[in-house]
Image (cartoon, helix red, strand yellow):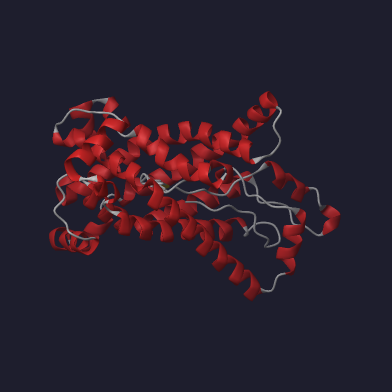
Amino acid sequence: MADEGEGSDSPERAAAGEGSTSDAAAGAARPPNAASRGLMNELLTSGVSVACATVVTNPLDVIKTRMQLRQAQGGSHPGLVATGAEIVRGEGAGALWKGLPPAVLRGLLYGGMRSSVASSGSSGSGDGNSSSGSSGSSGSGGSGSSSSSSGGGNSSSSSSSSSSGNSSSNSSGGGTGGAAPASAGTKLLAGTLSGGVAAAVCSPTELVKVRLQAAGSTHRSALAAARAVVEADGVAGLWKGATPGLVRAAVLTASQCATYDETKRRVMASTGWGDTAATHLACSLITGLASTTATNPIDVVKTHMFVSGRAGGGPLACAAALYRRQGAAGFMRGWWANYSSARAPSACAN
């Protein structure tokens, strides 16, 4: 979910490694053990934040999964609200929180890993001072939320590093001892790397989550779902669908970085707002349109691969089969649920 979730992916950070001259100077003077503690705190804070957002957005993630898979089951295609109502009528309100344990675990791992890897990557430029942002899913997916992060994920709610309006103050602090901020290319690379690493590591948790959320699932627990996958396809089967998860993470980061700065500039120019929470929220909602549209087709393919197992083939075979059955419109199933689950954590944060 928020996918990723993806839990959620927050464009204000995805387009910006926020910082100040004083932060850079403090980072330069910080001893290695203090820097390690700071990185661990960031990992925990980001992971817990994404996990908490996942609990709130899990119903949207369940609805997204059902909408994306319904085409494979040959049914009609009701919208977001109708699908949610159908789930409640047929399975009870508790069904909207199916897959919550692996979703929360993914949020803890994905949010924390993406934040820490992005911090490490962007701090590699300059004088070792970090200029980075954290992310969440699903989603990001991701799924996605595969926020995500991502994922993805949805789950998909998450954010990656890039450049912000206030980061430019670092570059002009020549006499203050502050290091120059990482370049836009470095931040894009760090964000893509962080999302890819987190998506690869967390792919089994997202697969199990989708297996539990799918209509007609007979698995009684996350452990039972994981065991069934291993028995049918081996341990490698837990990483079925990991490839589109990696691609989704890269596309998500690139689409956010490509649109956020320009959107922020135009919003501030047309409204007269400053660099405020309202500005960031508006930019998050607007850039989410681009990132969700860019990643939803990948998220649909990923979801189908999660439930198809070994028989489903690779990403290209899965995409071709979907296109033959549903046409191009099939790749946009669950768009609103994907957008809502990814933007909700950003709205709460702002």
**Whether residue 232 is visible:** yes
Left or right: 205 with respect to 179? Answer: left
- Which is more toward the observer, 288 or 331? 288
- Which is more toward the observer, 334 or 151? 334
Quadrant for residue 100, please give it. bottom left
**Whether residue 151 is visible:** no
Quadrant for residue 77, please give it. top left
In the picture, which quadrant includes the C terminus?
Answer: top right
Q: Residue at x 51, y 34 (%)?
A: 285
- Which is more toward the observer, 181 or 167? 167
Residue 332, compared with residue 316, is above or below; it is: above
Residue 205, compared with residue 295, is above or below; it is: below
Q: Residue at x 29, y 40 (%)?
A: 63
Q: Which residue is drawn at 73% across and 59% down?
A: 24
Residue 240 pos. (x, y %): 25, 52
Quadrant for residue 257, please give it. top right
Q: Which residue is drawn at 48% across and 53% down?
A: 193
Residue 64 pos. (x, y %): 30, 39
Residue 128 pos. (x, y %): 67, 63
Q: Which residue lies furthest to the bottom in this view?
A: 33
Residue 247, compared with residue 278, is above or below; it is: below
Residue 258 pos. (x, y %): 55, 36
Left or right: 76 with respect to 42? Answer: left
